[in-house]
């Protein structure tokens, strides 16, 4: 072995030693790692001292998982009516179906505990109409009379879908908004669930719109004017 070769092997040996040092370390530490390869978890243990300890002295901030920010929403239960009237889509994140089961008692409970955050204003009705035309009119008909093209063909013959939906002007007066929300979310009889087609926010707007079709919003307004 000549001098040049000896030098070369010494360098290789030193390098291997350094690399070995980097790889051989305490498993509970998350320290630096040469080519991390999922050999062990680099995760911090929950609520132990975490990565921010260095920057923040306060215990509250130095935990490995921080406490929820004030006014954020828990993952169980429905948010309060007050909260979701500001942000109607949160009712969806809260998995309505986990809070209300699919039966008549629960439908009634929805009717008395959740309320439409929207009023039938022009903007809301416009969105309601757009969604209704795409998702609902095939059965319920443009005017909400249960005569969409799936029910009655253009030539007047019976359509492909044999379950005839009730006219909204007959059915909706018997329902509270929360009950309609329940039916649109779970489906009702031969009508399937629209939970995956229509987001919660739009469901409320749809409800404003179908009540408009049923003439119910106008009734409300007439009552109000006679009161004045
Ligand atoms: C495939 C046809 C079909 C489509 C599409 C459809 N429905 Fe229905 N819908 C029905 C039928 C049939 C009923 C009657 C169900 C019953 O009472 O058994 C009904 C009933 C309803 C009711 C009354 C529910 C109750 O609790 O009595 C509402 C409200 C309603 N539909 C809204 C909608 C909305 C909003 C859409 C669009 C997102 C829609 N439907 C789409 C067929 C349909």
Image: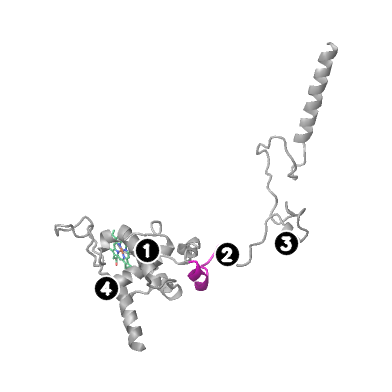
Q: Nearer the viewer, mark 3 or mark 2?
A: 3
Tell which circle, 3 or 4, labels the residue nearer the N-terminal end: 3
**Is residue 173 in view from this perspective?**
no
For mark 3, what is the residue?
60
Tell which circle, 1 or 4, labels the residue nearer the N-terminal end: 1
Q: Secondary structure at mark 4?
A: helix
Q: Nearer the viewer, mark 2 or mark 1?
A: 1
**Is residue 5 in view from this perspective?**
yes
Residue 83 in the magenta stretch? The answer is: yes
Q: Is residue 156 left or right of residue 72?
A: left
| Residue at horizontal 46 percent and vertical 64 percent from the top | 96
For mark 2, what is the residue?
74
Tell which circle, 4 or 2, labels the residue nearer the N-terminal end: 2
Tell which circle, 2 or 1, labels the residue nearer the N-terminal end: 2
Q: How many numbered discs?
A: 4
Tell which circle, 1 or 3, labels the residue nearer the N-terminal end: 3
Residue 42 in the magenta stretch? The answer is: no
Q: Secondary structure at mark 1?
A: helix
Q: Which residues are magenta?
A: 74-87
Q: Secondary structure at mark 3?
A: helix
Viewer-closest of 12 and 217: 217
The CA distance from mark 2 to mark 1 is: 30 Å
Residue 11, position as x, y percentages in the image: 81, 22
Whether residues under marks 3 and 4 lie with C-beta atoms below 8 angstroms apart, the answer is: no
For mark 4, what is the residue?
169
Q: Nearer the viewer, mark 1 or mark 4?
A: 1
């Amino acid at each position: 072995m000549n001098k040049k070769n000896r030098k070369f092997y010494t360098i290789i040996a030193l390098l291997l030693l350094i690399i070995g040092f980097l790889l051989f370390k305490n498993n509970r530490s998350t320290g630096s790692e040469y080519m991390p390869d999922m050999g062990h978890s680099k995760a911090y243990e929950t609520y132990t001292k975490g990565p921010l300890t260095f920057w923040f002295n306060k215990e509250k901030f130095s935990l490995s998982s921080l406490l929820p920010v004030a006014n954020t929403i828990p993952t169980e239960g429905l948010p309060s009516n007050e909260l979701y009237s500001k942000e109607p889509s949160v009712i969806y994140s809260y998995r309505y179906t986990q809070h209300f089961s699919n039966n008549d008692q629960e439908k009634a409970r929805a009717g008395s505990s959740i309320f439409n955050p929207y009023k039938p204003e022009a903007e809301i009705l416009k969105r309601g109409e757009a969604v209704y035309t795409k998702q609902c009119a095939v059965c319920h008909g443009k005017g909400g009379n249960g005569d969409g093209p799936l029910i009655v063909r253009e030539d007047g013959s019976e359509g492909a879908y044999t379950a005839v939906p009730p006219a909204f002007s007959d059915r909706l007066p018997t329902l509270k908004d929360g009950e309609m929300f329940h039916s649109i979310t779970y489906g009702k009889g031969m009508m399937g669930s629209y939970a995956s087609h229509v987001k919660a926010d739009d469901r409320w707007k749809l409800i404003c719109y179908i009540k408009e079709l049923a003439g119910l919003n106008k009734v409300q307004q007439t009552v109000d004017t006679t009161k004045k």
